[in-house]
């Protein structure tokens, strides 16, 4: 039976910047369509933003605009608080206060949930309210709903995604247009993709926040950002991007969550974010610009992929509004009928550990700048063999191609088969100590994603 005759859901918006502005615009433009889907109207009645004048200009008379977010939370007529301020500071306080006041919460704040999710979800459960966060991972792509509901029949083997638009934009523009890192980063900021602190993007922290949320939903483990391995793109050099291309790979910043299983025994969960070589023939290797894509492999469904805009005003607003519609449909339902925020019932969470990076199993690209002498390769392959690391391919770049001087150096590029990161660390330390290895060794992880 339609609930169309019910009163609208009353929303208070905290922060009307890039995503908040998009949310207001999308809800206004599509209000009739959204009402027909939700079974009731969704109305933004109050907006809080530090910049009241700018907010008023956008909102007009449609909603009351205040500078103090607590006024929104204190308003008994507000059913849902949408937090679009960002960060772990005031946003955390406001979200917890909104929950304590009995409001449902929608947020796009992956940083907040990856770090403080356990506390926030527990507070919401106790109060019988929903915390919805579709926009927190991969912007407009409904990956949380897909993983939490659409793939609920599956054991998830791995999730791997390009889940930071800013870094994908930087990598694509640098490769295609030869632009400098700093120039492209500024453009990403201008387009509203980058975080308030863009080091979160370029150092991999933002992608790791999102990977943390995906790992929790895929495996029913608590959010544990503190155990995630994080490596960004700032140390990536143009020469490795070029060599990777020549070898048939593209380098992407991937957030990965993988169940590590040996002889039928699950040892734990790998949770890592790092630049990764991906075969050029994979669809995900061809995801360019600020676009995001997430691959999920489930035991029943096989490999699936979700693609779309991972950042920006209206794409992210699309996910925020979808959460509002879900809440509008459920506000009068008993709390037991809510979909659990992390997909699994809270009393059925897994205790599987997040594995330390030394335990992660993957293949590697290793580049060594070496003296162009006989016997160097034999020493290197010997060290790898000692660690039980098997080599898939070895490529040598001519000395003059490297130094431009017809000099006495050469680049050796090794591709390995799967091995433990700990073994690779030992091999790299031993190789680095060789007098014929002339520069810091570069090591990048490689995933076939098959
Ligand atoms: P913006 O900086 O564009 O917007 C944040 C807004 O909140 C600003 O208008 C800011 O005002 C306001 N604000 C700051 N502090 C307060 C406060 N105490 N009370 C009320 N308003 C406040 O950020 P975004 O819209 O880009 O991001 C919002 C959230 O969405 C973040 O968690 C972000 O990580 C997430 N997100 C962003 C995406 C994107 O593409 N931009 C995509 C997916 C998620 P002022 O400007 O005056 O400081
Ligand atoms: N800064 C983020 C990105 C915004 O570039 O992907 C979307 O979460």
Image: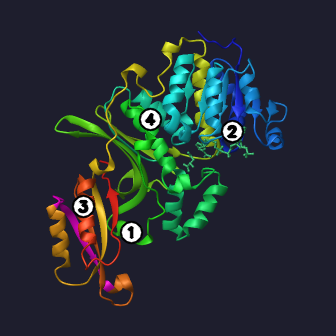
Q: To which residue does mark 4 refer?
A: 223
Across and down, in percent, residue 344 comes to: 40, 24
Q: Which quarter of the rendered image does ligand 1 occupy? A: top right
The residue mark sitting in front, 4 or 2, is 4
Q: Earlier in the sequence, mark 2 or mark 1?
A: 2
Q: Distance between the Cα atoms at labels 2 and 1?
A: 39 Å
Q: Which residue is farthest bottom?
A: 406
Q: Which residues are magenta?
A: 387-399
What residue appears at the point 30 percent right and 81 percent down from the top-left corner? 410
Identify the element where label 4 is drawn.
Answer: loop
**For residue 85, side relative to residue 158 (left or right):** right
Q: To which residue does mark 3 refer?
A: 426
Q: Earlier in the sequence, mark 1 or mark 4?
A: 4
Tag of residue 20: 2
Tag of residue 240: 1
What residue appears at the point 68 percent right and 20 percent down from the top-left corner? 79
Q: Earlier in the sequence, mark 3 or mark 2?
A: 2
């Amino acid at each position: 039976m339609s609930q169309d005759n019910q009163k609208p859901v009353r929303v208070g918006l905290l922060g009307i910047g890039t995503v908040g502005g998009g949310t207001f615009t999308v809800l206004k433009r599509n209000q009739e369509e959204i009402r027909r889907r939700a079974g009731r109207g969704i109305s933004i009645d109050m907006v809080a933003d530090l910049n009241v004048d700018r907010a008023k200009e956008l909102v007009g008379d449609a909603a009351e605009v205040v500078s103090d977010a607590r006024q929104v939370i204190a308003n008994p007529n507000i059913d849902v608080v949408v937090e679009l301020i960002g960060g772990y500071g005031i946003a955390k306080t406001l979200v917890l206060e909104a929950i304590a006041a009995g409001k449902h919460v929608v947020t796009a704040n992956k940083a907040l949930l990856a770090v403080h999710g356990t506390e926030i979800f527990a507070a919401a459960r106790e109060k019988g309210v929903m915390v919805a966060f579709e926009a927190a991972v991969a912007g407009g792509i409904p990956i949380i709903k897909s993983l939490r509901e659409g793939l609920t029949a599956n054991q998830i083997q791995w999730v791997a995604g390009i889940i930071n638009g800013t870094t994908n934009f930087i990598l694509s523009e640098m490769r295609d247009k030869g632009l400098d890192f700093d120039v492209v980063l500024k453009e990403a900021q201008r387009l509203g993709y980058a975080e308030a602190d863009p080091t979160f993007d370029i150092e991999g922290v933002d992608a790791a926040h999102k990977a943390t949320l995906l790992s929790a939903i895929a495996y029913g483990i608590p959010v544990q950002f503190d155990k995630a391995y994080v490596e960004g793109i700032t140390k990536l050099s143009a020469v490795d991007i070029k060599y990777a291309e020549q070898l048939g790979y593209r380098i992407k910043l991937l957030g990965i969550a993988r169940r590590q299983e040996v002889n039928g025994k699950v040892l734990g969960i790998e949770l890592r974010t790092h630049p990764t070589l991906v075969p050029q023939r994979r669809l995900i290797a061809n995801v360019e610009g600020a676009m995001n894509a997430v691959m999920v492999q489930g035991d029943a469904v096989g490999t699936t992929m979700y693609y779309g805009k991972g950042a920006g005003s209206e794409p992210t607003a699309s996910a925020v509004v979808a959460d509002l519609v879900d809440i509008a449909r459920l506000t009068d339902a008993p709390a037991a009928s809510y979909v659990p925020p992390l997909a699994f019932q809270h009393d059925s969470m897994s205790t599987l550990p997040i594995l330390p990076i030394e335990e992660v199993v993957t293949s590697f690209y290793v580049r060594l700048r070496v003296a162009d002498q006989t016997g160097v390769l034999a020493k290197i392959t010997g060290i790898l063999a000692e660690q039980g690391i098997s080599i898939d391919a070895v490529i040598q770049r001519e000395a003059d191609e490297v130094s431009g001087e017809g000099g006495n150096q050469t680049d050796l590029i090794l591709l390995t088969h799967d091995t433990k990161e700990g073994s690779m660390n030992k091999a790299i330390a031993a190789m680095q100590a060789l007098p014929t290895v002339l520069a810091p060794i570069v090591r990048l992880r490689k995933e076939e994603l098959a």
